[in-house]
Image (cartoon, grey):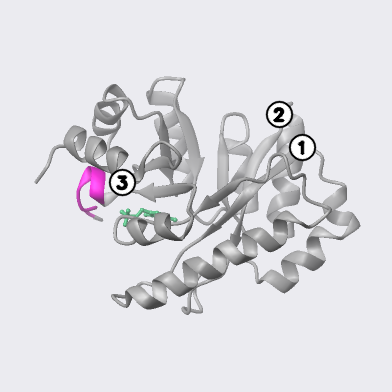
Amino acid sequence: MDSIEQSLNQIKKEIGKNVTLVAVSKTKPPELILRAYNAGQKIFGENKVQELVYKYESLPKDIEWHMIGHLQSNKVKYIAPFISLIHSVDSFKLLKTINSEAIKSNRTINCLLQLRIAEEKTKFGWELEELEVFLNSDDFFQLKNVRIAGIMGMATFTDDNKQIKTEFRNLVRIFNQLKVNRSINNSYFSVISMGMSDDYQIAIKEGATMVRIGSHIFGKRVYS
Ligand SMILES: *Cc1c(COP(=O)(O)O)cnc(C)c1O
């Protein structure tokens, strides 16, 4: 297997300068993250609040931490002081909490709206219709300390590349539709976060601006 450094270089070459790489370091120890960091990677993604806080505290402060996993409202306060981008905003309740914790930290927090594009019923996220209603509501208008920077989605876990492509294409279509929504500030709405180790090539072809890659960099995850 390639080393972390080799994998990172290969992926960076492959995705090019216009796509942002989030190195997904969940379950991996700080020593391995530091190796990627020393090889030039500054953006890391985690999916558990406790692990994220621990790693934020143990590692260099110029790392940009992204929250990519399902986030419970009662845990937002732990990451609000430092988080760079939350990919997984899937409800009004969560966004409202992020806004109030951002105020307490005297920050504006960048957020992506997570869309449900996969077939599986279990995946979190908005449907386009409910999102459009929400974005045009006064509830949304009140939230001044969150910045909607784009959208995120996960394709169905399948070998069927055609299906994955269709789902990513759908996400891009949704992005374009939201972009013309008057309640979204267009100058910040630019991120399409889609694509993981097994499907990032397809995602990039379809227009991803940000990919979230874990096992392809750090090796398979072992859950104990
Ligand atoms: C774990 C995870 C990834 C990375 O998965 P890999 O297959 O290891 O690249 C990307 N996005 C989310 C939301 C994840 O939870």
Q: Nearer the viewer, mark 3 or mark 1?
A: 1
Instruction: Kindly identify which numbered label has been placed on residue 107.
Output: 2
Answer with mark 3 or mark 1, whichever residue precedes in sequence: 3
Answer with mark 3 or mark 2, whichever residue precedes in sequence: 3
Element type where label 1 sits in the image: loop
Local packing at callout 2 (Cα closer than 10 Å; few below 14, some 14-19, many 20+) is some
Question: Do callouts 3 and 2 mark residues in contact (Cβ within 8 Å)?
Answer: no
Query: Left of 71 or right of it: where is 32?
Result: left
Q: CA distance from mark 3 to mark 2?
A: 28 Å
The quadrant the C terminus occupies is bottom left
Q: CA distance from mark 2 to mark 1?
A: 7 Å
Which amino acid, mark 2? Arg
Residue at mark 3: 27
Q: Which residues are magenta?
A: 216-222
221 inside magenta stretch: yes
Query: Left of 85 or right of it: where is 200?
Result: left
Residue at mark 1: 145
Local packing at callout 1 (Cα closer than 10 Å; few below 14, some 14-19, many 20+) is many
Element type where label 3 sits in the image: loop
Q: Residue at x 42, y 70 (%)?
A: 165
102 inside magenta stretch: no
Q: Residue at x 38, y 24 (%)?
A: 58
